[in-house]
Image: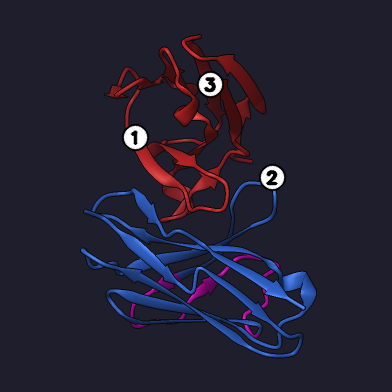
Amino acid sequence: EDQVTQSPEALRLQEGESSSLNCSYTVSGLRGLFWYRQDPGKGPEFLFTLYSAGEEKEKERLKATLTKKESFLHITAPKPEDSATYLCAVQAPNTGNQFYFGTGTSLTVIP
Amino acid sequence: GAVVSQHPSWVICKSGTSVKIECRSLDFQATTMFWYRQFPKQSLMLMATSNEGSKATYEQGVEKDKFLINHASLTLSTLTVTSAHPEDSSFYICSAKGSIYEQYFGPGTRLTVT
């Protein structure tokens, strides 16, 4: 069965302490891997789409990378306002338009 | 661009009543919209896929007679929770499919059934 697993479940960082979040997947024929940020009580905010292994995308302090089995979301010198839950989702040919979501990584950045 | 709105943002209703939630794509047309529900500290669970002009496709275990979905136009989908009960209390989020594979999410609707 297709699966998406995110780790760690929760991460606490000091402000300025860089780290990475992981999203591993087992879907066949990946169409796209998507990263979202979700703040409490709000809908997910789109961050990145990655389509093929080796692809990288950056936005401010965030950088997403993709291999054939996993994606990393690198956070460089995080700030308290980066605290949120980060979700990844994948789409594969056999899922139609549907996304498989991971359970998310809850990031807390301490001043 | 790619803004999705939901209305209302929160609603409290009595058990047995029905509640309608609207999802609109504000600056693009969406032939496909999705409805999710999310419980505290859990990820999003897909409830149904809504295609403009046709019947919604429901996920296994989701009661289609309880969660009525209408995708009447390219910018509007509605979810009606009929005869709501306390166990239906949740955070409901819609999304609209973008031009390729991406989905853009609304801000969510917090439903509390008393």
Q: Is residue A80 above or below residue B92?
A: above
Work out whether residue B31 can be spotted. yes
Q: Earlier in the sequence, mark 1 or mark 3?
A: 3
Residue behind mark 2: B41
Where A3 falls versus A110 (above or below)? below
Secondary structure under tag 1 reads strand
Q: Residue furthest top?
A: A17
Q: CA distance from mark 1 to mark 2?
A: 22 Å
Mark 1 highlights which residue? A48
Which tint was used for chain B?
blue
Q: Colour of chain A?
A: red
Across and down, in percent, residue B60 comes to: 66, 66
For the residue carrying disc 3, how many other residues have a C-alpha within 10 Å: few (<14), some (14-19), or many (20+)? many
Find the distance from the CA under tag 1 to the CA under tag 3: 14 Å
Q: What amino acid is at disc 3? A: Leu
Q: Amino acid at mark 1?
A: Phe
- Which residue is painted at 30% across and 21% down in the image? A55
Q: Residue at image x 62%, y 24%?
A: A7
Circles 3, 2 touching at the beta carbon (< 8 Å): no
- Pointer 1 and pointer 3 on the same chain: yes
**Span highlighted in magenta in the image:** B50-65
Q: Amino acid at mark 2?
A: Lys
Residue A3, horizontal then vertical, whole percent: 61, 37
Reading the image, the residue beneath label 3 is A21
